[in-house]
Amino acid sequence: MKKILFNKGKILILILMVFGFQTVYGQNTDVSYFTIKGKIKDQANKKEIVFATISIVGTHVGTVTNTDGEFTIKIKKAANAKELEFSHIGYNSKRVLISGLKPEGNDILLESSSVSLDEVTIRPSNAAELVRNALALVRKNYSVIPLNFTGFYRETIKQRRDYISISEAIVDIYKGSYSKEYDYDKAKIYKGRKSANVKRTDTLAVRLQGGPYISLLLDIIKNPDVLMAYDIVSNYDYELTNIISVSNKLNYVVSFKPRVVNDDFPLYTGKYYIDVKSLAFTSAEFSLDINDKEKASKFFVRKKPLGLKLIPMSTNYIIKYKEVNGRYYFNYARSEVKFKCKWKKKLFNTNYTIMSEMATTDWTAENVNKFTKKESLKKNTVFAEELTAFMDDDFWGEYNYIEPDESIETAIEKYNRRVKKQNN
């Protein structure tokens, strides 16, 4: 067995010498809701906007667009919802009457909104001090009470261009208070499915360890040891590079990069988005510094099969928060890691891409349930091994999910055709 540690946030990958096949079951549908599908695009160039947020106004219910800019949102009839809100970093938010939308084929156009630094009267003179001031206001800007979230989690593994594993689930989350260091997040599966071995591969199979905890660990406000602990802040250089609109509110864009060489672990390069008025972190985009391939490889690899060399090629992480009544809440997280595997006596390399993402689709602060150890997923769980394969087109029922990218949808369809053929 091989374990690969991806960052200080304990993102793990298992490479196992196994492959498998699963049984198929069905699921009943629910008609207590209706569905709206569409795409979000840039108003000027008509390009799709990825990871944009869609919310039902007046509720905590929402979802995000996929990498094709597509979205699907389920709306309960009993909610009597009137409007949807569409938002993304660098764009003006837009509200649209639900009555004016079709079940499918809606194109939502967002207007870009960028503010010149020269137009802002008050600008921080020291970007590092701005980051420290924002950190000092975490208790004011984020939830000091625990919450129960409903989320949609998906993870995929690609070998070159082909998917070899797709796993996804509706998950229940206990989200600990941001003011209590040891009030840890917990996760459990409500319902899930997988299409394992979408493409038949050789005996080297990749498994991602951690499941929803990967996304939860990317919550850098809750887990400051990744980037934001006070002793880590001084490891970086910061620069105020722009001011843009996020959900119709001005945000500082603060870029950061390593200012020191850390012998213990690689550091990160990225951007923070900080609300101008509240100094809340609204989003972050970052990647691990892997310029030193040898050093990064040693950091990633704990154990490996004899003769296998693993070379990390790129890492990309995203975390987004959503403001509700003056406080910010976990909204979306995404991790993508690309690496190359090379066997000692083989001529060709094999490239892998591992992606995981989770969107908050609803949450409540009432009657919060802190899951027991027995019912919670373990943090070293191989998520795909907790699920059973499904083929039902309406498997998710009334629950919101992230619309699969076209390539994922195609892979699942191929897998389902193969299963049906074998079962006949």
Image (tube, helix red, strand yellow):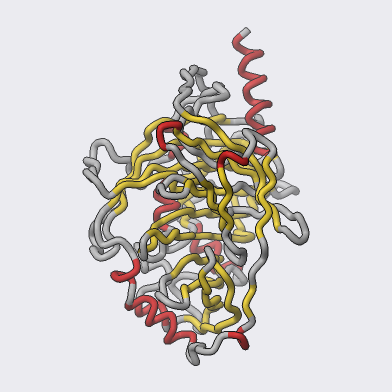
Q: Residue at x 49, y 17 (%)?
A: 25
Rendered position, 53 above or below 211:
below
Quadrant of the snapshot with the C terminus:
top right
Residue 187 to residue 18: above or below: below
The answer to whether residue 106 of the structure is visible from this angle is yes
Q: Residue at x 46, y 85 (%)?
A: 128
Q: Please indicate, yes or no, whether residue 309 appears anywhere in the rendered image.
A: no
Query: Above or below — where is 126 with respect to 4?
Result: below
Residue 58, image x, y percentages: 42, 49
Left or right of 59 on screen, residue 296: right
Is 305 in front, or is 396?
396
Residue farthest to the right, as pictured: 45
Question: Residue at (57%, 70%) from the top-left corner?
Answer: 245
- Residue 271 in percent (x, y) is at 55, 72
Q: Residue furthest bottom?
A: 125
Q: Tell me where residue 207 appears, x and y as whole percent.
A: 51, 41
Quadrant of residue 286 within the rendered picture = bottom right
**Residue that sits furthest to the top in the current view:** 424
Please state which of residues 403 and 414 is positioned toward the viewer in this rendering. 403
Task: Pick whichever, 3 or 220, lies toward us.
Answer: 220
164 sits to left or right of 325: right
Q: Position of residue 356 (x, y in %)?
A: 52, 48
Residue at 66% across, 13% down: 421
